[in-house]
């Protein structure tokens, strides 16, 4: 397998770099409702791309179309520049790791891993060596004779990985592969999978509904909702600069409050909240597609207003409706802007003299506030 | 949302594309089931359709008396026909004698005109010897039957290729001379009572299996695992055993010198042998025994899915044990009760072996009459018509079953 | 297990009564089956218990009498042929039905199950009249065809049940790893649905081997099966050789049942 530089960050802007290209892809099962609407997406060679979204958002259908298990209703999927919509899965040479692994229960671990080699004319010693190497890579060299049912969930997951990698595909697809594992194991597997992908230089398309998994592993994340990609960006951009209300709400926690745009000032948007309070926010690109606007700010970016603050702060106040102790911080629910609930995370040490029912003065930086559509 | 022209076109395009894309997969799935579908159509559906046709098929008069039927077209229907009709009949019967088909048409017409079979045979023998007319007097000398207009209207009616006769008979009805329907004579009206008896026995058996089976299903769900497994074995093993073996067991048990009688005598519960075999009680007991597992299993499978926490919840909300059972538990078992009872009722309708071996003459079901008309009386039309009636009743309840339960809910063991 | 710990005394009493009733019903279910076993070993030609003296004379008659022996062979041959035909057709159909794209599912399923529902006499008389047109009455072929029609629902139901627990991702995985349609079927799908197929085959065998009514109408003396021989015997004059035959059938049922139970246990594991 040719080693690719994987530390470079690829945006797949040039088409010759794109290993996979979805072009105007639509999928409908009943001819009336679309599961996937107008999908355009390039996946670059060597990239770890995650499709993130709630269930029913179209991400798994998209993965199944790439794997060859579903056919696009309209549009094209290009693999290395060639359309593959009509190519059956067994001709695509794509590794696929299924939800719940889909290990063959009537075969041993080694037989499972050797399965794809048979169709590629690899037999005997060569096959045994490849199987041993693949199992070694996932730390299971000793368990080749076991049946899948005799393995733990994490071990089964590793076998599925070894089986999908043993025939050295350049593209590997994963459908919620860690969904069945407990939290600790899941976090360890995230790192292992990422390391394997980097060291082997494989292109990976990964489907999950777990945002922290997506943020940890991905080079780029495509956020799916309602059959469309809501935003396609690297994890940092996605977290700090969500482009619409859905992404803001789906990635991490966010306060989104209705507002109206009253003007622009020094690259900042000036907005009026429901109760007339005027705040400033970083201006996200507005498409004009939606009349409603909202201001979004993360709870950890809201602090208590004090004397030691730099100028140009957004200041507002409200009544505390709830307080929860969460170890390192307090979580305050504050009714502000005429009744909207704003959540703030305040370090425990600062929360003195604040009680439910009392008034509290809060502040946030305009650069932490985003003006969003929707 | 504005409905612009391109959107609509797009939708149509998608719809067509989806339908087209689904077609190969649908066809592939269907083609796997096709061998069995074709096989069943040929070996199962076609015989049943053939049975339906047999129930209305009426070839005898048409094939044996074609000239007579032709001559009868101008008959007024009220008087004794003229010479031309009798000449045609003579010609037909002459031919019939040569082909030995006179008995065939005689037997068919005998269903509707008692005594017609022998008259027809005698007439054919006479006709064979006649060279020239006049034929009318010669036939009238044979008996009044040839003078009666009713005879001729029956012959004319049976010139049709299809007849409602067998189906009407199976419902104790007949065509009145006027053309309408009327009931047959009370001494011939047996089939509705046979059908009623079949439904009654099926109903009694269904009710008994429910009364006996419901507690068993319930105990199966509360018994400790190993005991429940043994109990389940006691339900499933009879189901697995051949129907004939189970019926044989009952024949032996119910004999007047059999096990039950000897036990009753030994316990001094009776001093005389009780007649058990060839009785309604014997038939119903044996059928209930055979059908019990069919009622128990669906009820059990529903009961097993009811969470025990529901009864706890009912109790915590203030309901006593009896009221918790009837208001919370029993209503939830209803789907199983419906499935089990409908299945047992459907299967009970078709019983043949058990009534034939355990029942007396008054316990014979529709199935047994069908068999008798095929094997002993060789009256296929009537056997088929009874079959149609039985089939329709069964399919109606099967339809109810499909609607309430569904074919995919049928499980084995 | 029997009772929750919070049960009231009256609840305890009624529960005890219900359990006692259920046990009585279970005895009613099972006892008649085993009544025939001691009778078949009785030396006397009548049916009373307790048996005074045991002997194997009725079994000697069963295996020594060519009429009985031929009947057993006829039954076995018809049952084996039926099993092969029904398992093949039923499994194929179940594979189709299990696919999500299967059209007209409700109608076709209702048709495939209907041989279990239609009264057996109607099937028997219908085949008797219809097969007569093609010279299939009084032939083994006719009997096997009719028995196969009766047996296929059992195969369809058992294989469909197995397929409903089959993870279709296994087939997808096989494809993604390079296996074509047929190869994926034989190497992945088939080994995993085999227990269901064998269960269906056992049901099909039992259906044919035990069936009386259709065989009664479709066979002459030469193809006469064991149940037909028994049925005629009971109608005529019940004799202890029939008890021996019934005991044999019972033993076969228990054997098949045990095989089935073993299979389901293995599947559960």
Image (cartoon, coloured by chain):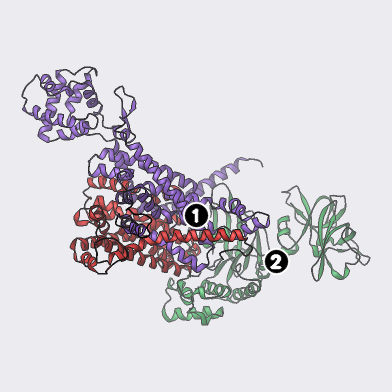
Is residue A14 or residue C13 the one in the foreground? C13
Inter-mark Cα distance, 1 to 2: 61 Å
Query: Which chain wears purple?
Result: B
**Chain letter, disc 1 residue:** B
Whole-percent x, y for residue A140 in the image: 54, 80
Query: Which chain wears green?
Result: A
Whole-percent x, y for residue B160 in the image: 26, 29
Picture residue at 21% right of the left edge, 65% below the top: C61
Where is residue A12, by image quadrant? bottom right
Crowd around label 1: few <14 · some 14–19 · many ≥20 (10 Å): many
Residue marked by disc 1: B214
Is residue C87 or residue C248 the one in the foreground? C248
Dot 1 falls on a residue whose secondary structure is helix
Q: Colour of chain C?
A: red
Residue marked by disc 2: A235
Whole-percent x, y for residue B164 in the image: 31, 32
Is residue A265 or residue A205 the one in the foreground? A205
């Amino acid at each position: 397998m040719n080693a690719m530089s994987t530390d470079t960050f690829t945006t797949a802007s040039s088409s010759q770099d794109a290993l996979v290209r979805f072009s105007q892809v639509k999928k409908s099962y009943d001819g009336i409702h679309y599961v996937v609407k107008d999908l355009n997406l390039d996946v670059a060679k060597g990239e770890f791309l995650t499709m993130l979204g709630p269930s029913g958002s179209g991400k798994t259908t998209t993965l199944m179309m790439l794997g060859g298990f579903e056919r696009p209703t309209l549009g094209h999927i290009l693999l290395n520049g060639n359309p593959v919509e009509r190519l059956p899965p067994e001709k695509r040479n794509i590794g696929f790791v299924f939800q719940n692994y889909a290990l063959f229960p009537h075969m041993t671990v080694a037989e499972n891993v050797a399965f794809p080699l048979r169709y590629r004319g690899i037999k005997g010693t060569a096959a045994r060596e490849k199987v041993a190497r693949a199992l070694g890579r996932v730390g299971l060299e000793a368990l080749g004779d076991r049946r899948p049912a005799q393995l733990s969930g994490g071990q089964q997951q590793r076998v599925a990985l070894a089986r999908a990698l043993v025939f050295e595909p350049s593209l590997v697809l994963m459908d919620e592969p860690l969904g069945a594992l407990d939290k600790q194991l899941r976090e360890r597997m995230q790192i292992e999978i990422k390391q394997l992908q980097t060291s082997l230089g494989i292109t990976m398309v990964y489907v999950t509904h777990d945002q922290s998994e997506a943020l940890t592993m991905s080079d780029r994340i495509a956020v799916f909702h309602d059959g469309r990609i809501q935003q396609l960006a690297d994890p940092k951009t996605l977290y700090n600069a969500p482009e619409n209300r859905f992404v803001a709400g789906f990635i991490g926690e966010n306060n989104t409050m209705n507002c109206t745009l009253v003007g622009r000032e020094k690259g900042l948007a000036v907005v009026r909240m429901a109760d007339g309070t005027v705040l400033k926010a970083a201006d996200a690109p507005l498409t004009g597609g939606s009349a409603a606007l909202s201001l979004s700010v993360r709870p950890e970016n809201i602090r208590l207003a004090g004397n030691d603050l730099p100028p140009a702060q957004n200041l507002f106040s409200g009544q505390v409706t709830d307080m929860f102790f969460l170890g390192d911080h307090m979580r305050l629910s504050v009714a502000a802007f005429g009744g909207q609930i704003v959540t703030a995370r305040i370090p425990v040490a600062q929360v003195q003299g604040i009680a439910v029912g009392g008034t509290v003065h809060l502040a946030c930086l305009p650069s932490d506030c985003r003006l969003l559509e929707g | 949302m504005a409905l612009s022209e391109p959107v609509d076109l797009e939708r149509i395009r998608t719809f067509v594309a989806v339908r087209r894309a689904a077609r190969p997969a649908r066809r592939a799935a269907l083609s796997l089931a096709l061998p069995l579908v074709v096989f069943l159509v040929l070996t199962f559906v076609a015989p049943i359709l053939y049975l339906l046709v047999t129930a209305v098929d009426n070839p005898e008069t048409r094939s044996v008396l074609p000239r007579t039927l032709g001559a009868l077209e101008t008959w007024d229907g009220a008087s004794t026909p003229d010479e031309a009709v009798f000449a045609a009949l003579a010609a037909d019967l002459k031919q019939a004698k040569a082909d030995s088909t006179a008995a065939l048409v005689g037997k068919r017409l005998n269903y509707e005109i008692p005594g017609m079979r022998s008259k027809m045979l005698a007439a054919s023998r006479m006709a064979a010897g006649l060279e020239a007319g006049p034929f009318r007097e010669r036939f009238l000398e044979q008996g009044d039957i040839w003078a009666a207009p009713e005879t001729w209207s029956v012959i004319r009616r049976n010139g049709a290729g299809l007849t409602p006769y067998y189906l009407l008979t199976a419902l104790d009805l007949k065509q009145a001379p006027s053309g309408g329907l009327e009931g047959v004579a009370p001494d011939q009206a047996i089939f509705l009572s046979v059908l009623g008896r079949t439904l009654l026995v099926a109903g009694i058996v269904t009710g008994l299996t429910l009364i006996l089976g419901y507690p068993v299903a319930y105990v199966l769900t509360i018994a400790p695992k190993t005991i429940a497994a043994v109990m389940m074995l006691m339900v499933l093993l009879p189901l697995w055993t051949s129907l004939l073996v189970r019926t044989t067991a009952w024949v032996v048990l119910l004999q007047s010198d059999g096990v039950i009688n000897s036990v009753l005598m030994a316990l001094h519960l009776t001093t005389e042998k009780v007649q058990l075999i060839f009785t309604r009680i014997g038939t119903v007991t044996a059928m209930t025994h055979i059908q019990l597992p069919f009622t128990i299993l669906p009820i059990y499978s529903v009961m097993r899915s009811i969470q025990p926490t529901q009864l706890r919840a009912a109790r915590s909300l203030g309901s006593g044990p009896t009221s918790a059972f009837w208001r919370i538990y029993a209503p939830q078992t209803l789907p199983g009760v419906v499935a089990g009872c409908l299945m047992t009722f459907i299967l009970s309708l078709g019983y043949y072996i058990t009534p034939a071996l355990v029942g007396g003459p008054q316990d014979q079901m529709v199935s047994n009459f069908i068999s008798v008309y095929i094997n002993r009386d060789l009256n296929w039309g009537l056997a088929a018509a009874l079959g149609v009636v039985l089939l329709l009743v069964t399919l109606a309840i099967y339809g109810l079953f499909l609607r309430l339960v569904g074919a995919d809910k049928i499980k084995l063991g | 297990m029997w009772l929750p710990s919070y049960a009231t005394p009256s609840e305890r009493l009624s529960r005890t009564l219900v359990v006692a009733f259920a046990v009585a019903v279970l005895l009613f279910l099972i006892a008649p089956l085993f009544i025939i076993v001691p009778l078949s070993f009785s030396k006397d030609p009548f049916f009373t218990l307790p048996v005074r003296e045991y002997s194997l004379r009725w079994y000697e008659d069963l295996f020594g009498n060519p009429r009985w022996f031929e009947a057993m062979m006829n039954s076995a041959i018809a049952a084996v042929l039926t099993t092969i035909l029904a398992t093949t057709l039923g499994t194929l159909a179940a594979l189709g039905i299990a696919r999500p794209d299967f059209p007209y599912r409700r109608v076709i399923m209702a048709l495939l199950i209907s041989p279990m529902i239609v009264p057996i006499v109607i099937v028997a008389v219908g085949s008797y009249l219809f097969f007569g047109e093609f010279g299939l009455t009084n032939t083994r072929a006719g009997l096997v065809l009719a028995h196969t029609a009766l047996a296929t629902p059992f195969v369809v139901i058992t294989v469909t049940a197995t397929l409903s627990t089959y993870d279709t991702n296994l087939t997808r995985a096989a494809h993604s790893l390079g296996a074509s349609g047929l190869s994926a079927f034989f190497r992945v799908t088939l080994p995993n649905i085999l227990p269901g197929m064998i269960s269906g085959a056992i049901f099909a065998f039992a259906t044919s081997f035990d069936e009386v009514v259709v065989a009664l109408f479709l066979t002459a003396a030469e193809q006469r099966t064991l149940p037909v021989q028994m049925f005629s015997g009971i109608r005529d004059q019940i004799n202890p050789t029939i008890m021996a035959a019934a005991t044999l059938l019972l033993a076969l049922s228990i054997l098949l049942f045990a095989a089935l139970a073993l299979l389901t246990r293995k599947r559960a594991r």
